[in-house]
């Protein structure tokens, strides 16, 4: 379903420890909005819903709701630290057909 690079898994683990909740799972979903139509939403969750796709990558539990799963199939999450542009999570998604100029929304 979705994989994490070692860099992303380490950053996620560090963030969970900073919040004092190392048991939290990463939830990712595709939501409507943005200039190209769809964008990603990342957050923490402590409970998997009945219709979630649950995977584990590099020691991190990843939750994806059933509506988002087809859009995210085969994706990889990385953590990129570019001194000039800042740092953040980058999602490499083979299902994206086009994205907006700012890169924050996509068409599938």
Image (cartoon, helix red, strand yellow):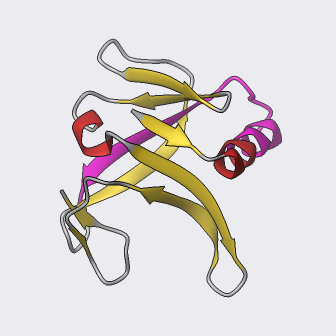
Q: In the picture, residue 48 is in which quadrant?
A: top left
Count of number-bearing discs: 0
Residue 47, image x, y percentages: 50, 18
Looking at the image, residue 64 lies above or below residue 30: above
Q: In the figure, 5 relative to 67: above or below? A: below
Picture quadrant where residue 65 is located? top left
| Left or right of 53 on screen, residue 37 | left
Whether residue 94 appears in magenta in the rendering, the answer is no
The residue positioned 81% from the left and 37% from the top of the image is 17
Q: Which residue occupies the extreme bottom position in the image? A: 84
Q: Residue furthest top?
A: 50
Q: Position of residue 23 (x, y in %)?
A: 69, 23
Q: Which corner quadrant holds the N terminus?
A: top left
Left or right: 7 with respect to 28? right
State whether residue 98 is above or below residue 61.
below
Asked whether 93 or 28 is in front, the reply is 93
- The part of the chain drawn in magenta is 12-33
Vertical relation: 101 (above or below) 60: below
């Amino acid at each position: 379903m979705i994989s994490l690079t070692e860099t992303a898994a380490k950053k996620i683990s560090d963030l969970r420890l900073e919040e004092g909740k190392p048991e939290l799972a990463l939830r990712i979903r595709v939501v409507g909005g943005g200039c190209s139509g769809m964008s990603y939403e990342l957050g923490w969750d402590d409970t998997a819903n009945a219709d979630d796709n649950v995977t584990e990558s590099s020691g991190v539990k990843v939750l994806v709701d059933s509506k988002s799963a087809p859009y995210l199939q085969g994706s990889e999450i990385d953590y990129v630290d570019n001194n000039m542009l800042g740092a953040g999570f980058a999602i490499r998604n083979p299902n994206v057909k086009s994205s907006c100029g700012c890169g924050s929304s996509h068409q599938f």
